[in-house]
Amino acid sequence: MTFRMNFLRTPSGNCFAGNDRLFVRSAERNAPSIIKLAKSYAPKTGKALEIASGSGQHVVQLAGVLPGLTWQPSDISNIQMASINLWIKEARLANIKPPILLDATNPGWSSETCNQDFILVVNLLHLISFNDTKVMIEELSKALAFGGRLMLCGPFMRDGKLTSDGDVHFHQCLRKSNVFLGYKDDVSILRLLDNFGLILVSTEKMPANNLAFVAEKLNE
């Protein structure tokens, strides 16, 4: 990965809930809308992979409401891996696997996690470069099974434009930290999905001016 902003090192709302278990306020706020969307578009059974699981708050809630899916959390940070393990231990759900270290911007990772029926990516694309985004979406397509679905959630430009003062401020902060970071354009993301054989199922408006793209792999 060329660069990924690590918000564990900034005053972004992360805190420790006990031992190494992290509690992220924004993740808790986002959870209901993500769960609602996943219940609408995810398959009822099969294999599910979450990219950049972070604290682990989302995956345990999703595993609880979608028990027919076997969930595989992942992240690139040992701190977050420890947190995910603690959330899993507390949840005591049989359909969550131990987290794996996975950098989704590295070419070739899909060969180790293939035939996924559902893949979820939340709040990651603005923290990586556009080149890394291209690599990731190509690998996501390869990791999906035929008929599998991808759900990408987060903040995006609309037709090249930032549409709120908060988005302008956040995008500028990201660009100041690294010129390759920042909001990706919705049109560019849709083009990448199409280029890598993923057919758009729906574009959904999410809280906090975010978007979610749901796409399906219809060709092997």
Image (cartoon, helix red, strand yellow):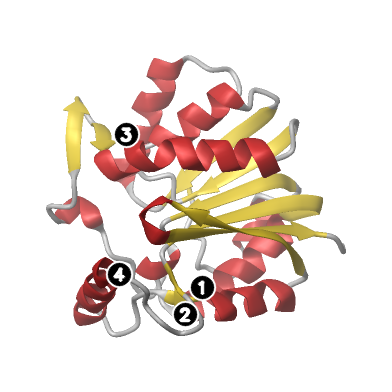
The residue identified by callout 4 is 167
Question: Considering the numbered disc 1 on the image, is that residue within a helix, a strand or a loop?
Answer: helix
Determine crowd level at label 4: few under 14, some 14-19, many 20+ residues with C-alpha closer than 10 A. Answer: many
Q: CA distance from mark 4 to mark 1?
A: 19 Å
Q: Amino acid at mark 4?
A: Asp
Q: Amino acid at mark 3?
A: Ser
Label pair 1/2, CB-CB below 8 angstroms: yes
Circle 2 residue: 130
**Mark 1 or mark 3, earlier in chain:** 3
Q: Position of residue 214 (x, y in %)?
A: 65, 56
Quick one: label 3 or label 2, which is nearer the N terminus?
A: 3
C-alpha gap between disc 4 and disc 3: 28 Å
Q: Earlier in the sequence, mark 2 or mark 4?
A: 2
Label 2: how many Cα within 10 Å (few below 14, some 14–19, many 20+) = some
Which type of secondary structure does the marked residue at label 2 adopt? helix
The kind of residue on which mark 1 rests is Thr
Residue visible at 71% across and 51% down? 149
Indicate the secondary structure of the residue bearing disc 3. helix
Give the distance between the C-alpha atoms of the residues marked 2 and 4, in whole angstroms: 18 Å
Give the foreground label among 2 and 4: 4
Figure quadrant of residue 5: bottom left
Q: CA distance from mark 1 to mark 3?
A: 25 Å
> Mark 1–mark 3 contact, CB under 8 Å?
no
Residue 213's x, y, as percent? Answer: 60, 60
Residue 133 — which label? 1
Q: Do the residues under discs 4 and 3 have CB atoms within 8 angstroms?
A: no
Residue 83 is labelled as 3
